[in-house]
Image: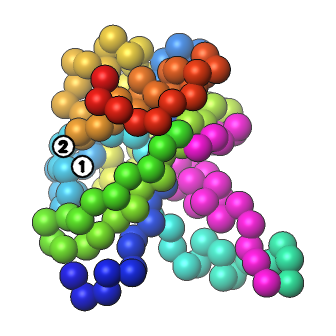
């Protein structure tokens, strides 16, 4: 690791529609977690804010929310609303790159799923029980459980279910 202060920042969306959650399968060509199921999201890029006007003299606001909306739209074609924080995690990947992942809950707003082929090759709307039948990236099922509890008004910190 060359710079221990520099993390790639990733934001993900646990998207719900009624009692189902959207999961997507990562393309076989992906370097990390190929052909595994997850929730949509992606990296924060400097262009997500520097090309926009600042909301105050010094700062851009809602940067993560804007990034999440962009990533979800690019990967799935969906619009989302009512974004809420769920949890966060950090890792150092096999290639030495450290990542900070911010997981959010978001409500389906509109549109039909249209997958970005280079990112994902399949999708499913699943209940919690159905999600257990998919090869999810480690920790994702626990996040789905947290999201379900949060929707019921019971916020909690991540723990292995």
Residue contact at pointers 2 and 1, CB within 8 angstroms = yes
Indicate the colouring scheme: rainbow
Label 2 sits on a secondary structure element that is loop
| 93 lies above or below 18 | below
Answer whether residue 91 is magenta in the image.
Answer: no
Res 83 label: none
Q: Which residue is mark 2?
A: 35
Q: Which residue is mark 1?
A: 27
Label 1 sits on a secondary structure element that is loop
Task: Give the class, few, some or many, for how many residues have Cα within 10 Å of label 2's Cα (few <14, many ≥20).
Answer: some
Task: Give the class, few, some or many, for how many residues have Cα within 10 Å of label 1's Cα (few <14, many ≥20).
Answer: many
What residue is at 39 percent from the left and 80 percent from the top? 6
Query: What span is in magenta?
Result: 58-85
What residue is at 56 percent from the left and 36 percent from the top? 105
- Residue 24 lies, in percent from the top left, at 35, 37
What residue is at 23 percent from the left and 39 percent from the top? 138
- Residue 20 lies, in percent from the top left, at 48, 18
Which is nearer the N-term, disc 2 or disc 1? 1
What residue is at 74 percent from the left and 66 percent from the top? 61
Where, by quadrant of the figure, is residue 141 drawn? top left
């Amino acid at each position: 690791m060359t710079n221990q202060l520099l993390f790639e920042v990733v934001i993900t969306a646990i998207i719900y529609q009624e009692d189902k959650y959207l999961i997507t399968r990562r393309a076989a060509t992906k370097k990390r977690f190929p052909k595994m199921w997850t929730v949509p999201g992606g990296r924060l890029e400097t262009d997500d804010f520097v090309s926009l006007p600042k909301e105050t003299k010094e700062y851009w606001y809602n940067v993560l929310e804007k990034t999440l909306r962009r990533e979800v739209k690019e990967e799935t074609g969906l619009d989302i609303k009512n974004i809420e924080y769920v949890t966060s995690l950090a890792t150092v990947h096999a290639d030495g790159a450290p990542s900070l992942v911010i997981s959010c809950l978001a409500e389906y707003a509109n549109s039909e799923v249209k997958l970005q082929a280079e990112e994902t090759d399949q999708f499913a709307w699943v209940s919690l029980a159905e999600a257990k039948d998919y090869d999810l990236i480690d920790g994702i099922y626990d996040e789905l459980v947290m999201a379900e509890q949060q929707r019921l008004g019971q916020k909690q910190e991540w723990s292995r279910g």
